[in-house]
Image: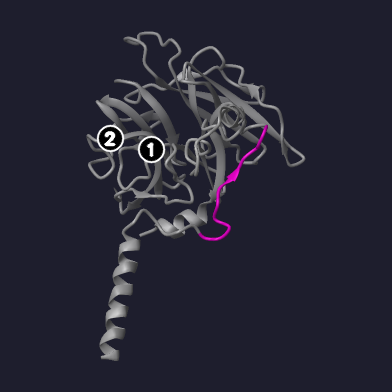
């Protein structure tokens, strides 16, 4: 009888373990919690998102928006003696909705989405633009040519070291993820990444490719399993095919919105945006008016802030 009881306990333990494994992800490890970037300077009571850091680690490019998204302004902050300095608006931003700045792996090109006027465009849509870094600063942005801006709105773009471009577009209805290969200096046909990545019930607004195209970081609404709003996922390149995206887990994703992934040039840090705060924290009692007012004026008021977490933790917890 005792042996049977032990076997039953072992079976129950295995079943519970399997059930836990089928949930979103394993519990966060110690020291695997996100760190806010530039608290009070970059991450403030305003709504910030993005966070593309230059290869030397001395510049960060991000967005500040007027809620609810009437104007996106791209900014840069410089790291001096270990402290992020007061942000400045980029010289070509501040007038239109300029969103999602993403640096190329070498830091010489800044990709972003914008609804600024584009000659020959039909209607008012978001298109992908690029500015080049020169000895005198950033060049005037130019819209990418070819299939990238051919149809619909494009709201996020990232580039691999070989020049292949990954971007999100609503050209088929929902926002899906596409790839355009760089061939002889020109972007080729937009390729749908397929049903494991794109589906009618899923809207993916961000797709950040690793420099070597080994994985793809995705910000999606409607992808399961999820934690309640936009979550961050990862898909691995398996011999040229993209794996089913896996949720990055509770150390990163909450019931609030998590989105806008980036990588540092050395691949050691995942940069992302989270709206965690007063809208996601668990409370035993309702806010008083004074508490609500004070909280809404603070950094954790439910608007976007920029965080980082070790990428080795992400890979360890999600790699097949």
Quadrant of image for the N terminus: bottom left
> Which residue is at the front of the view, 140 or 263?
263
Find the magenta span and give its range. 29-40
Mark number, residue 175: none
The residue under the point 22% across, 42% down is 195
Q: Look at the picture and state if 232 lies above or below 236.
A: above
Quadrant of image for the C terminus: bottom left
- Whether the residues at callouts 2 and 1 have beta carbons within 8 Å, the answer is no
Give the prevailing secondary structure in the magenta stretch. Answer: loop
Q: Look at the picture and state if 101 lies above or below 37.
A: above
Q: How is the image coloured?
A: one colour
Which label lies toward us, 2 or 1? 1
Query: Residue 153 location in percent, x, y?
Result: 34, 21
Q: Secondary structure at mark 2?
A: strand
- Residue at numbered disc 2: 191
The residue under the point 55% across, 49% down is 309
Asked if one can make out residue 189 in the rendered structure from this viewpoint, the answer is no
The residue under the point 43% across, 10% down is 117
- Residue at numbered disc 1: 229
């Amino acid at each position: 009888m005792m042996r049977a009881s032990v076997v039953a306990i072992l079976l129950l333990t295995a079943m519970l373990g399997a059930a836990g494994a089928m949930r979103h992800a394993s519990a966060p490890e110690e020291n695997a919690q996100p760190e806010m970037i530039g608290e009070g300077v970059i991450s403030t009571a305003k709504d910030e998102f993005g966070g593309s850091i230059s290869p030397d680690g001395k510049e960060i490019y991000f967005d500040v928006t007027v809620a609810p998204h009437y104007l996106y302004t791209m900014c840069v902050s410089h790291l001096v003696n270990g402290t992020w300095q007061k942000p400045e608006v980029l010289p070509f931003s501040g007038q239109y909705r300029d969103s999602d700045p993403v640096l190329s792996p070498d830091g010489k090109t800044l990709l972003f989405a914008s609804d600024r006027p584009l000659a020959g465009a039909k209607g008012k849509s978001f298109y992908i633009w690029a500015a080049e870094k020169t000895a005198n600063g950033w060049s005037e942005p130019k819209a990418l040519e070819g299939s990238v801006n051919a149809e619909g709105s494009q709201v996020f773009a990232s580039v691999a070291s070989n020049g292949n471009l990954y971007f999100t577009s609503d050209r088929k209805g929902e926002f899906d993820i596409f790839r355009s290969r760089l061939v002889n200096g020109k972007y080729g046909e937009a390729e749908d990444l397929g049903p494991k990545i794109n589906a009618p019930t899923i809207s993916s607004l961000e797709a950040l490719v690793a420099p070597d195209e080994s994985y793809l970081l995705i910000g999606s609404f409607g992808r399961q399993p999820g934690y309640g709003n936009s979550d961050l996922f990862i898909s691995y390149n398996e011999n040229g095919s993209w794996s089913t995206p896996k949720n990055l887990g509770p150390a990163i994703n909450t019931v609030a919105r998590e989105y806008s992934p980036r990588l540092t040039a050395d691949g050691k840090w995942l940069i992302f945006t989270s709206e965690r705060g007063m809208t996601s924290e668990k409370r035993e009692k309702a806010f008083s008016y004074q508490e609500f007012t004070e909280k809404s004026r603070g950094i954790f008021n439910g608007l976007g802030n920029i965080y980082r977490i070790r990428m080795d933790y992400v890979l360890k917890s999600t790699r097949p």
